[in-house]
Image (cartoon, coloured by chain):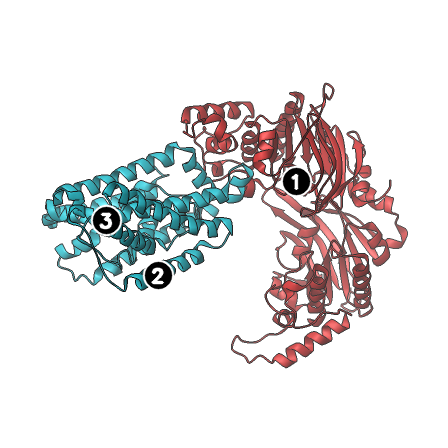
Chain colours: A red, B cyan
Amino acid sequence: MSAANAPLLQLSSVAKSFGAVRALRGVSFDLRAGEVHALLGENGAGKSTLIKVITGAHQPDGGTLAMDGGLLEKLSPAAARKLGIACIYQQPALFPDLAVAENIALRLESGGALRKVDWAARRLQAVGLLERIGADISPDAEVRSLSMPEQQLVEIACAIGSGARIVIMDEPTASLTRKEVALLFAVVRDLRSRGVGVVYISHRLEEIFELADRVTVLRDGQSVGTCPVSGMTEAGLIKLMVGREVAQLYPPAEGVAGQVVLALKQLGCAAGGVKNVSLEIRAGEIVGLAGLVGAGRTELARVLFGITPADSGEISLNGRSITVASPQDAVGQGIAYVPEDRRRHGVILEMHIAQNMSMAIHSRIFPAAWLRDGAEARLAQEFIRNLGIKAYGPQAPGGSLSGGNQQKVSLARWLATRPKVLILDEPTQGVDVGAKSEIHKIIRRLAMEGLAVLMISSDLPEVLGMSDRIAVMRGGTITALLPGKSEAHAVMAAALGQNP
Amino acid sequence: MKRYFRELSVAGALLILLLVLALFAPAFFQPQPLRSLLTREAPTLVVACGMAFVIIIRQIDISVGSQFAVCSVCAGLLAALKWPLVLVLPASVALGALMGAFNGMLVAGLRLPSIVVTLATMVTWREALRWQRQGQFVNLPDNLQWFGLSQSGGQWTLIGAALVVLTLLAWATRHLAAGRFIYAIGSDAEAARLAGLRPQSTTFAVFVFMGALVGLAAMMNVVQSPQVDPKSGSGLELKVIAAAVVGGVAVSGGRGRLWGVFAGLLLLACISPALTHFHVEAYWEKAIQGAIILLAVVADGVRSRKQIR
């Protein structure tokens, strides 16, 4: 293939692993000049990793990248930018304390640290670029004072100013209003008409049909198909995204759900972006909370646990209305929350696992505020045995354990509070397969012992395999309640806001 | 063993220094100068214990020197008004706690950075005192010095008091839930909050306690001389922070032991007399102390890098 008709960007069999996790397993992808190419896939399908390979942030383990037919080797972020590859992230990466013109200048100007700054030219350049994309933003405004979409427009101005030939947009419309979306689309179409290749990532299928020329679907780190958008239907795309069997075996649900333990009525929290959530969870029931990243699932958990207390609606526990204004309240009422990201918010790595486990129940096992090592060690030993934690004893530092075992320690801390409601946030994220199925068994056993479990998970097979019922969130509220034996594409369709 | 490596290495360094002194400068161990040295360091030890808590909870308090001066002068003035010691001591402790509460309110209540807050209070207390006293010393009644005991009796009382405070606090960090809270919050405030602890009120309490200990230490200093110098306590904050850091308290919070701080304090305090006995010029003292602090910080830095890997 000669350089003249080679695609603008060509990825062939690109692979990338992080430890044991194979994020990309041979993805091929091509982008032509003057097209909008959408990239679609569920959470964890490998979209972000693929972008990072293109922008030089990650080095692929295998496969090749080529631009205009020429191989790109050892691509670094700086080199990628020089080649005209620009990426606009969902959260703009601007300097909030600097003016718009300075932000643009930082990206575009080169030269030594001691060169003289031409402020007038800087400003003129910024005005020109902002005008070109039809953005009504003052070049002297501090970026901090701009709204999220305005910041995105500044990012786009940077990309255009740098003469980018490839622009990657990662969910650019996630926080935009309809009007702003229309403006953004006009800018994207303008880019396309100038021969720029745009990689467009979005969970909103209707946008893809409106804007994109072709679409590539990723699933489990592989591309499962690239096709022109004109020949596709929404149902077809959803099928491509989820089309797989639930490979793992999940523990069976036995027994029947009991009384309603937790009932939410029209629950809302403006600060957390949660609105109008109504849900009931019964004793012995696992309710899976599905949805895309940013749908408000963790935010809902934080409201229930009193981290960002609810400002409207009602929470009732065993039929009694309660207020949860702080985590202490929640623990006192019998609500436990095993947070996402255990390394940051769960296990304290410097402390013993016994100390970690007693953290939430100090006042109970140490009545007069005296620490009693014996009581603590007994508690820890019981959980180590019960949950099958692999550690040399209660005195092992939290940081010495594997991910799965840390997760069990985090779980033990909350089980020690003897909760009635257990909220799990991504309970098996970053945990290896063996530990994952152990944790699943533990969760099911806890439910059978009468706990009401709310399980947030981005792992669709896990939601389908574990849940007795599935609540799907979108835009901060629950949009669908599905039975546990639902089909994957029904859940995905609800998460994407489609009517199946 | 590995867990306390940092503390043990400081204790080891101190032992080696004492051994060298015992072999080559036995004069260092003459009872009277040694007792004087320990008496001088007794108030510093009390303040260093409080500072250890402040640093473990991942804050800093550089206003302790100024608090110390304010407490000393006020205690002196009250004593000059013929208040008995049993009232002056609690008054000094309460005043310290009040100043600590002011810091705590700004740091924990308004969530301002502690370095800036305590920098402001450090300057404010010090200047207010200078304006009020105009550099004048406070003359104390005769019966206050050494609590009215003989000099050696008073010195032993002060050394004993400091050791009792150290022992009690070391025990409390290990056996009271409050001690655990401080470590947990210093390691990871967000995880601690999610576990139902109260990072803000605990931080406030630690600042109050720091102030109270300063009040006690000020009193321990006042009884050592017939007058109170309004400039007393200058540089105290640096001495106690240095002792804590050398003694293995991690500036990043969540780690440190009081007996390590004790060893660190003694190590730094012995440098000056050791130099005298080895006939090295006293100018070297600060340089050597600086080198020890640097070594401690580098050791911690290397350690935490290894942990990340």
Q: Which circle, 2 or 3, is nearer the viewer?
A: 3
Q: Which residue is mark 1?
A: A303
Residue drawn at x 77%, y 60% as measured from the top left: A31
Depicted A167 relative to depicted A441: above or below = below
Within 10 angstroms of label 2, few (less than 14), some, or many (20 or more) residues?
few
Between B214 and A137, the one lying in front of the other is: B214
Q: Which mark is residue B186?
A: none
Q: Quadrant of residue A43?
A: top right
Residue that sits furthest to the front in the current view? B81
Q: Which residue is mark 2?
A: B128
B183 relative to B127 in the view: left or right: right
Q: Amino acid at mark 3?
A: Ala
Name the spot of residue A200 as percent of width and height, x first: 76, 57
A363 relative to A102 in the view: left or right: left
Between B285 and A203, the one lying in front of the other is: B285
Q: CA distance from mark 2 to mark 1?
A: 47 Å
Within 10 angstroms of label 1, few (less than 14), some, or many (20 or more) residues?
many
Q: Amino acid at mark 1?
A: Val
Q: Which residue is mark 3?
A: B79
> Going from the N terminus, do you reach mark 2 or mark 3 first?
3
Q: Amino acid at mark 2?
A: Ala
Name the spot of residue A346 as percent of width and height, x first: 55, 38
Chain letter for the residue marked with disc 3 in the picture: B
Depicted B19 relative to depicted A254: above or below = below
